[in-house]
Amino acid sequence: MRFVLNQARALAGLAFAGRFRALAVLLIIFVLFNTLVRVGLAAFNGDLSLFVPWKILPALAIGIAFDVTVATCFLAPLAILIGLLRTRGTVLIWALGIVLLPLIAVMVFVGAAEFTFWNEFASRFNFIAVDYLIYTSEVIGNIRESYNLPLLLSTVGALTLAVWTLAMWRVRPMLRRPLAPWQTTLVVIALWMAAPVIAIGVAEARHKEFSDHPQLNELAGNGYFDFWHAFWYNEIDYERFYNTIPRQRAVRELALELSGHRDDITITQRPNEREIVADGPRKPLNVVLVSIESFSAEFMQVFGNRRGLTPNIDKLAREGMLFARMYATGTRTVRGLEALTLSVPPTPGHSIVKRPHNDHLFTVGEILKGHGYEPLYLYGGYSYFDNMREFFSGNGYTVIDRSALKPGEIHFENVWGVADEDLFALTLRELDQRHAAGTRFFAHVMTTSNHRPFTYPEGRIDIPSRTGRDGGVKYTDWAIGQFIERARGKPWFDDTVFVFVADHTHKGRGRQELPIENYHIPCIIYAPAHVAPRRVDTIASQMDVAPTLLGLLNVSYRSRFFGHDILREGQNHQRALMANYQTVGYYESGRMVELKPNARFRVVDSTSGRELPMDELSRHLLDEAISYYQLASEAFRLRDLNSGEGGGVKGRQP
């Protein structure tokens, strides 16, 4: 062991000898800068408990290890430059200075970007950041409208020059040192070429998960490394990376889950496929499902908010059926769309909305289309974003977005889309056309206004545009109130069921990996002529909305959904499924099962986050959680989520 340490010291001394000592200075600057970013993110989090020594010091130490790993990738080419440019020191100084300036600019810019990303997602870079490279116009537009871009860029520029000046002042004397012999130089270059390969080979993303506190684990990461990792691993094979159980056991667990644990069920190899028989004659009602951008339950008065942000939605909650313990499946719009449309768990990696081979799936639109409805998807932005157009059109929906509006019909727009009032005006126009043609409609409407930069037409509410989240929430509420009032005067209103549900909440921060309160969303079914006011306190998942809606319409069908009717099976077995990037979870009986890559898992108390012993209840919940995710992942991989003959909607025309 002593021999190995001595050899390591000798190699380190050689790698930083002579002119190459300049690389040690650059390494220290890189590590110090990223450590300051790490501390800044912790301070930005606003949780002073993170700064106790036994929490912050391990995070900083692990973070420095990741920083050194990333630094080797930048320093290796600089080592080649220093070694091969065997000329007078002045020429080398100028050459290195020219190369260093853009590299330091990238370092400072990435640091600033990490703060904006952390503000939005409470995370270091992940596959969302990778996605954003695809939609640069929306992302850059959002940054331009949300932040003072001239101030931000000028600050980045000034800090870049300051760090560059410091770096050049420190390395200049070292670059004037005598040249080493060619043999020594080539050995040093070889060492630096090998360093990134060895460092990246040793480093793993799981090394940063040293504690039970998710924010500490995120702080221990490195933005460059996490981005690279997300780029390569944003599609995750559940069976390869996550905990599994024997398939027959999983099949039985899921069959019992979806049957409400009845004893008289027949267990088949496709447990999510089952016959749904309505209690009475089908109700031929139109459906308008509005998924509301970033709308947490905590915004509403009915859930204790006293700021008066949602008078219209609170009124709908009092007059309709309020599902008071509904939980989102994820933290992004595409996760909400996936759950509401396909009724599937949030399997690891990308939402199915963004995956290849996601057409001709078994959707709520497919079922209603088989009963004479026209499925519509209406979006206030351009539907190419997040692959929405391809997903919905590939699954039989008519896709209508902001391009259907003429300039004179738009009162306000930002980079994400037109103001919600204009989206709802477009929706009313399209629904009027379907009603006039005698076509029943199922319209899924996706709003955009409650999204940073929180801009909207002036004069609508008493909070000025661009002043923060409260304004976005209150304007969205105002637009929904106007939409319902205008719809009330339509001839199709009394024969329409409205569903208002959030796509996800507005925050991801929490002391736990999957903080249950940060997934709590409202869900309201409103149809004054058909649905009596009621509060439902059953714990439910976003993927249960479609089966519950079909149950209210008394639609019989052969289901492939993984969700269940909250008003029937849901009362017998209350649970919710949710995910945060690579961690997928299962919430039941006050416990949260967390499933992670490398077959890791935990069962924690959903309130305190304290890890619980693997008693009989925890083992049972673990099996249930694995069954959902294992079989849902398998079903998509084997195309068992497809529609067609298995969909069971043929022969059920009105």
Image (cartoon, grey):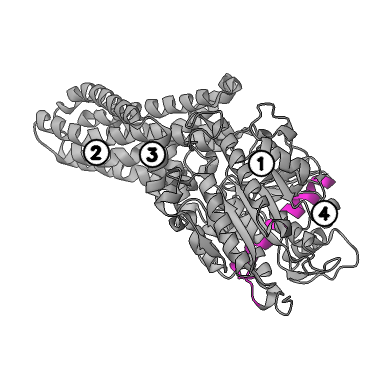
Label 3 crowd bin: few (<14), some (14–19), many (20+), radius 10 Å: many
Q: Which mark is residue 70?
A: 3
- Residue range in magenta is 616-644
Marks 3 and 1, how far apart at CA: 34 Å
Q: Which mark is residue 519?
A: 1
Tell me if I can see residue 344 in this picture: no
Q: Position of residue 123 (x, y in %)?
A: 52, 37
Looking at the figure, which quarter contains the C terminus? bottom right
Q: Earlier in the sequence, mark 1 or mark 2?
A: 2
Labels 1, 2: front one = 1
Left or right, 364 with reference to 424: right
Tell me which amino acid carries mark 4.
Answer: Leu
Which residue is labeled 4 in the image?
567
| 317 to 635, vertically: above or below | above
Mark 1 in CB contact with mark 4 (< 8 angstroms): no
Tell me which amino acid carries mark 1.
Answer: Tyr
